[in-house]
Image (spheres, helix red, strand yellow):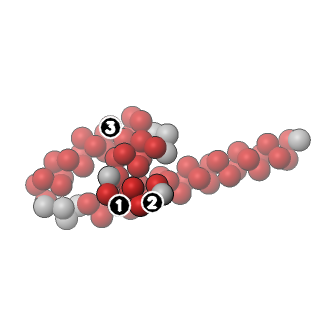
Amino acid sequence: MNYVLAILLPPLSILLTGRPILSIIIFLIWVPAIIFSGGLTHPMFIILAWILIYQSSEDRRARRIERANRD
C-alpha cells in the first residue's frame, strides 16, 4: 500500500515510514520541483520513497530477527 502511495505523494509516503523531518524536507523540495519542471523530477522522488520504504521494512525485519535470537 505504501508503495502505491509513493507513486502519488512521495512526501506522505516517507512520513508514513517514520521519517517526519526528512518528509518535511522532501516536501519543501518536491513542490517547487513539480511546479518548475512540470513533473519531470517526480520519478526521482518516487524512487527515493521506494528506497526508504524498503529500508524501513528491512530494519523492522532485522529487529524482529534480533529479538527472536535473544529469546
The local secondary structure at tag 2 comes to: helix
Q: Nearer the viewer, mark 3 or mark 2?
A: 2
Q: Amino acid at mark 3?
A: Ile
Q: Residue at x 42, y 47 (%)?
A: 14
The percent coordinates of residue 64 (x first, y second) are 73, 47
Question: Considering only vertical position in the picture, is 36 above or below 28?
Answer: below
What label does residue 7 carry, if any?
1
Asked if disc 2 and disc 1 are in contact, CB closer than 8 Å, the reply is yes
Q: Amino acid at mark 1?
A: Ile
Q: Amino acid at mark 2?
A: Tyr
Residue farthest toward the top in the current orientation of the protein: 21
**Mark sitting earlier along the chain (3/2):** 2
The percent coordinates of residue 43 (x first, y second) are 30, 64
Asked if disc 3 and disc 1 are in contact, CB closer than 8 Å, the reply is no
**Mark sitting earlier along the chain (3/1):** 1
Residue 17 seen from this side: yes
| Position of the C terminus by quadrant | top right
The percent coordinates of residue 15 (x first, y second) are 42, 42
Would you identify the image quadrant in which residue 8 lies? bottom left
Marks 2 and 1, how far apart at CA: 7 Å
The local secondary structure at tag 1 comes to: helix
Residue farthest toward the right in the current orientation of the protein: 71
What label does residue 3 carry, if any?
2
What label does residue 68 carry, if any?
none
What label does residue 24 carry, if any?
3
* Crowding near the residue tagged with mark 3, few <14, some 14–19, many ≥20 C-alpha atoms within 10 Å: some
Marks 3 and 1, how far apart at CA: 17 Å
The local secondary structure at tag 3 comes to: helix
